[in-house]
Image (tube, rainbow, N blue to C red):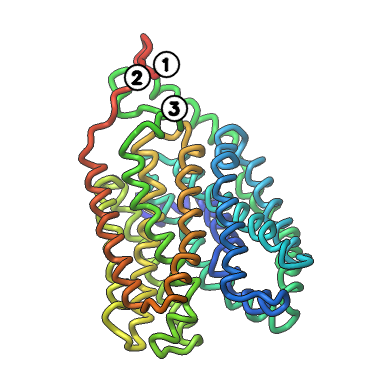
Amino acid sequence: MGYLRFLTKNRRFLSFGILIAFFSAFGQTFFIAVFGPEIRAEFGLSHGGFGGYYAIGTLTSGFCLIWAGKMIDRFDLRWVAAGVCTALILACANMALVPSAWALAPAIFALRLSGQGLMSHTAMTSMGRYFEAERGRAVSIAILGFPAGVAVFPGLAVWLISMFGWRMAWAAVAVALALFLIPLALWLLKGHGARHRFFLTQTATVQTDAPTASVRRQWTRAEVLRDPRFYLLCIAITAPSFISTGFFFHQAPLAAAKGWSLAWMASAFVAYTIGAIGANLAFGPLIDRFGARKLLPYYLYPLMLACLSIAVSSHHMAAMTLMFFMGLTSGSGQTLIGAAWPEFYGVMHLGAIRAMVMSMSVGASALSPLVVGWLIDRGVAMETIAIGFMIYLAVAIASILLALTRPEPIPDRVNEKGNMA
């Protein structure tokens, strides 16, 4: 089925995925970082001080995501969506009311958990769970919400800050979300009850089909944690979060080191969006045709080229090259990873499994500003940091290849129907 026909047939549910991914932007690094100068100025914080509060809030949200993320396996998606959207609205309102520096960590925690964590998790898990043969297309379409947020919201934040100040900017976001986000999300989920009942019927049929049990095994989170392949894959999957966040968060010292203006760096985000959207649309049909497993080893190569451009060039077009190739890895990676976990571990406990992975990615995005900032403070050149990232990526690619060559572990116990006991 082509993209247009598939999108038309499933337009409401796919729009829900795009919507939730789009508004996850308010908890993402690229959006929060826009408010950094004003927040540091008001509370008298250094770059390191603000980064420290950011890391504390982000790491804590990552740990909590392990528990909160599995709620999507237990409750109706409509209730989950309403709850997650409400949490994001309250988090944005809380940012407008932060009284002092000590309150930044819990405020950032709320934004990161609700926005980057649960909004993204809800969008990707719902697409991966309720589509089978066309899972790649579904994930790739929903993921378009992420680069769209990158393209729209930083500029909107700059305008709101210039017009109303940083606190009122957060208040305006909270009010706007409260007025239409939850009603729109629930409207897009109209008829989801029938979809979920069909999903349960299909899953039950697969689980009682003994000849395909080895292929369709529905892993629990405890079983996944005993699988060595999971940890090999996570080495690779956390690499883009660590590297991209490092470049995003420290774009000012990167621009200074290369002789670029901050305005030029901001304009380079357009290249990121183009790369991400192009990769999203390209990889969806490829996943449906070849499977996510076969494509996984290749998605980190563009990020390797992004790091290479920083390591070898200070030309102003290197900023565009950096952003474009980071966008390629981001777009293809989000699509691939969203489709890969169901291929490896099934869909019955997908929320709990993805929550673990997202927790690791959030942790990587929290550590990156600290590690890279520490290196910059000690005089390590951006070129050297980029080379270090390339070595990290080489290890990550090798870990994917090793994971794909390892056999699937044999279940510990199998009952008389051929199911996991």
Residue matched to label 2: 412
Of mark 3 and mark 2, the one earlier in the sequence is: 3
Of mark 1 and mark 3, the one earlier in the sequence is: 3
Residue 172 at what x, y percent from top left? 74, 69
Label 1 with label 2: CB-CB less than 8 Å: yes
Please determine whether, in this image, residue 198 is positioned above or below residue 415: below
Which residue shows up at 27% across the image and 74% down it?
308
Residue matched to label 1: 421
Helix, strand or loop at mark 1:
loop
The residue lying toward the viewer, choosing from 409 and 317, is 409
Label 3 with label 2: CB-CB less than 8 Å: no
Please determine whether, in this image, residue 75 is positioned above or below residue 168: above
Q: Which residue is most to the left?
A: 405
Which residue shows up at 29% across the image and 60% down it?
393
The 10 Å Cα crowd at callout 3, few under 14, some 14 to 19, many 20 or more, is: some
Which residue shows up at 46% across the image and 70% down it?
374
Residue 83 at what x, y percent from top left? 68, 45
How far apart are the two marked residues, 1 and 3, measured between alpha carbons? 16 Å
Of mark 1 and mark 2, the one earlier in the sequence is: 2
Locate residue 56 relative to residue 418 in the image: left or right: right
Mark in the foreground, 1 or 3? 1
Helix, strand or loop at mark 3:
helix
Residue 253 is marked as none
Residue matched to label 3: 203
Q: Which quadrant does the C terminus fall into?
A: top left
Q: Tell me which amino acid carries mark 3.
A: Thr
Locate residue 192 relative to residue 234 in the image: left or right: right
Please determine whether, in this image, residue 213 is positioned above or below residue 396: above
